[in-house]
Amino acid sequence: MRLETLNLSNNNLGGDGAEAIGALLGDPRMRCLAHLSLRGAGIGPEGAGEVAFGLQRNETLKSLDVSRNSIGKAGKAALGAALLNAGRHGGGAPLMGLVCDEWSVACDDPAGSRVL
């Protein structure tokens, strides 16, 4: 059995939980995770940065929902930079959908999803 979808929505993960999720995303053993929802998980701007750090090293995630987290400009910038820099650190997710409060990115071409 493979973990392909992980829904942690509406859990109060906070910064520590987001740091653990970032580490999970960056772990090469997690090559099966394709969909992650952190909607309303209380990760905040710093947590978004931790998730972004792991995202840069992930090769399989296709969709990420970080809406309702009050990640602010800093969190959005970190996630945007992660998408633009994906692949520079030995991987890079073929992310095809990213949902945030004010915007979302969806595309059929994984390379196109890196342009916000």
Image (spheres, grey):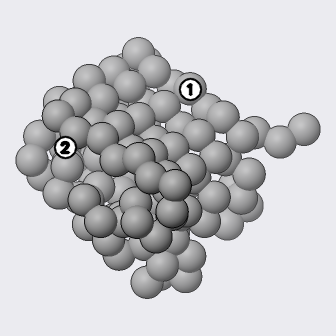
Residue 114, image quadrant: bottom left
Q: Residue at x 29, y 46 (%)?
A: 48
* Residue position for label 1: 7
Query: Callout 2, which amino acid?
Result: Pro
Q: Can you give x and y, in whole percent of width and height, for residue 18 in the image?
A: 39, 41
Badge count: 2
Q: Do we see residue 53 in this rendering?
A: no
Question: How far, Cα to Cα, is label 1 from label 2?
Answer: 20 Å
Label 1–label 2 contact, CB within 8 A:
no
Q: Badge 2: how crowded within 10 Å, few (<14), some, or many (20+)?
A: many
The dot on residue 111 is none
Q: Do we see residue 52 in this rendering?
A: yes
Q: Residue at x 74, y 51 (%)?
A: 32
Left or right of 27 in this view: 18: left
Q: Residue at x 22, y 39 (%)?
A: 103
Left or right of 108 in this view: 113: left
Q: Indicate the secondary structure of the residue bearing disc 1.
A: strand
